[in-house]
Image: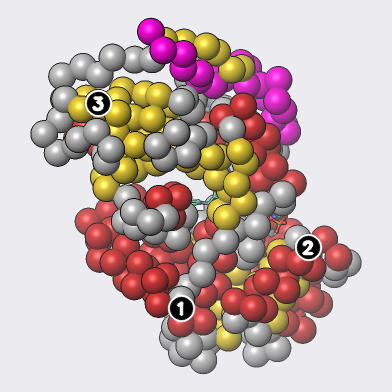
Amino acid sequence: MTENRQWVLASRPEGEPGREDFRLEEIDRPEPGPGQVLVRTLYLSVDPGMRPRMRDRESYAPSWQVDQPLWARAVGEVVESDHPDWAAGDLVVGRWRWAEYDAVEGESLRPVPLESEPGTALGVLGGTGLTAYFGLYDVGEPTPGETVVVSGAAGAVGSVVVQLARLAGCRVVGIAGTDEKCDWLTDLGAAATINYRDTDDYWDAVEEAAPEGVDVYFDNVGGEITDAVLDNVNDHSRVAVCGQVALYNAEETPEGPRRMYQRTRTRVEGFIVYDYEDRFDVAIDRLRDWYVAGDVESRRTVAEGIEHAPDAFLGLFEGANIGKQLVQVADRGD
Ligand SMILES: NC(=O)c1ccc[n+]([C@@H]2O[C@H](COP(=O)([O-])OP(=O)(O)OC[C@H]3O[C@@H](n4cnc5c(N)ncnc54)[C@H](OP(=O)(O)O)[C@@H]3O)[C@@H](O)[C@H]2O)c1
């Protein structure tokens, strides 16, 4: 058997997770069964939504289990196939273990949308881009001239939302944690930015950045930043609740709505990208057209080597990434 390495959950963290919650194991390379494909992992996606999976709660099912392998969206190269759709050398995207090799149901795999840049299948041309697309356009329903505020704006999803809102003819305000990130958001077309780590009064900062009020709020972070934005919303505004990264490590989350919206008739709507699965192909085609034409750019922060996967994940909670955080496990054809 050829050597293979995989990460398992060593323990369930309380509060901030740490490296001790992960364990790297050496295992055999799996044999693909009937209908399965042996994939060699090229890229793994890490994202903040994995933190709730470290908890053992029904509402976060399927959770990761202690001493069991972790899983992620991933891009790989087919090594061996027992499925008619796939042959050795194909580049595929799917979900499998944080491992160098895995045996995956052929039925669950898709081709990468852009062969020359396979990593985009986990970013702008994958779940990240789709989350931005449906969260902004379907939930946020922006119209030209409106003000769109995006929190977590220099992250994977947020940076695509900023650009899609600009393409929709909106005035965009991006909120992020460093000046470097804010400068990049300006390059992407944000009319104003807020470095929240350098701001004493979030409320004043939002009012100054969005003097005509907020029509659409795309929320990736929750917490106090969101409180400040919600205090500045316009009548009939829309809030797309995408994620709450500022609260994922909290052991006690404040109960109930933190602000009241009835005065402004604001619609606050959570969403999960998979709600829109039947329209994924159309959205990926549009995103790919924009990406290839240079209308939407994609930045990636890449950790090299499977041994650094937990560090890449933990860095998300410190803002270590700009754009999409990936782990590169191997080069194609190594
Ligand atoms: N609804 C869905 O279907 C769906 C799908 C995918 C992702 N999501 C959610 O979308 C959000 C963004 O995900 P992503 O993959 O694009 O991650 P990401 O934004 O690339 O990475 C997380 C970023 O969040 C910021 N952050 C971390 N801790 C924070 C805190 N306490 N307060 C404010 N900002 C903080 C950091 O940037 P700064 O330097 O700016 O702090 C960090 O770079 C997450 O909440 C995720 O769970 C939802």
Disc number placed over residue 80 in the picture, else none: 3
Q: Which residues are magenta?
A: 1-22
- Measuring 46% from the left and 13% from the top, which residue is drawn there? 3
- The image position of residue 332, as x and y in percent, is 42, 40
Q: Look at label 3 and name its amino acid.
A: Glu
Residue at the limit of the structure toward the right, as seen here:
200
Instruction: Say left or right for 306 vs 272.
Output: right
Is label 2's Cβ within 8 Å of ligand 1?
yes
Name the disc covering residue 295, or none.
1
91 lies above or below 194: above
- Mark 3–mark 2 Cα distance, whole angstroms, equals 45 Å
321, 31: nearer the viewer = 31
272 to 175, vertically: above or below: above
- Element type where label 1 sits in the image: loop
Query: Which residue corresponds to the image point at 47% horizontal and 25% vertical from the top-left?
Result: 99
The answer to which of 282 and 206 lies nearer the viewer is: 282
Mark nearer the viewer, 2 or 1 = 1
Q: Is residue 305 above or below residue 204?
A: above
Residue 166 in picture, x, y percent from top left: 51, 82
